[in-house]
Image (cartoon, helix red, strand yellow):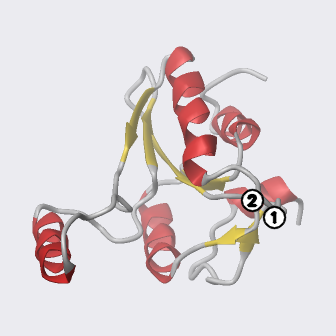
Amino acid sequence: MTPLEQILVIPERAPRKQRFGKAVKGGPSERDIQRPMVTALRKLGFMVHHSPNASMLAGDKFARVKQAAAVKADGMLAGFPDLVLIDRDGEVGFLEVKKPGEALTDSQAALLPKLRARSPRVAVVVSLDDALEVVRRWGWINA
């Protein structure tokens, strides 16, 4: 299986230990990868929304537990992909952004296959090039 095929295929239950891309010591953070991706995709005309599931909660342990309960009650789904893309025709896609060599969390490994069962447009990407190739394969941009 090629690296891109690995990115596009999310099995029924994605193995947590499956690593995406080749690890780069001292490489970019997930944020360093995601921000240029958001900029480029928006320039191509996509509406892009970041789901801040991994946001840092503030305060002591009690305050963080309280905040975590509040965001879950507000509708947060653990493991939800980082980016929601909407093309000009209203079609929706989901991108989980990972650092090269990083694996899915348990919640991502559980949720992504369920999301894939509802939408064919779910992928894990480790670079802007991966994201662009994914939206090409979805038929949203020309080669």
Q: Secondary structure at mark 2?
A: loop
Is 80 displayed left or right of 39 in the figure?
A: left
Above or below: residue 108 compared with residue 3: below
**How far across and down, in percent of the image, does residue 108 sit?**
48, 72
> Is tag 2's residue or tag 1's residue first in the polypeptide sequence?
1
Q: Which mark is drawn over residue 75? A: none
Quarter holding the C terminus is top right
Q: What is the three-letter code of the residue carrying label 2?
A: Pro
Residue where numbered disc 2 is placed: 100
> For the view shown, which residue lies furthest in the right direction?
2
Above or below: residue 125 compared with residue 32: below
Residue shown at the point (22%, 64%) measured from the top left: 58
Is the residue under label 1 in contact with that under label 2 (CB below 8 Å)? Answer: yes
Residue shown at the point (68%, 68%) measured from the top left: 102
Residue shown at the point (84%, 58%) measured from the top left: 3
Is 77 displayed left or right of 114 in the figure?
A: left
Q: Which mark is drawn over residue 23? A: 1
- Of residue 44 and residue 62, the one placed in the foreground of this image is 62
Above or below: residue 125 compared with residue 108: above
Above or below: residue 85 compared with residue 64: above
**How far across and down, in percent of the image, does residue 116 sit?**
50, 63
Q: What is the three-letter code of the residue carrying label 1?
A: Ala
Q: Secondary structure at mark 1?
A: loop
**How far across and down, in percent of the image, does residue 101 sit?**
76, 67
Instruction: Give the CA distance from mark 2 to mark 1.
Output: 5 Å
Quarter holding the N terminus is bottom right
**How far across and down, in percent of the image, does residue 124 sit?**
62, 57
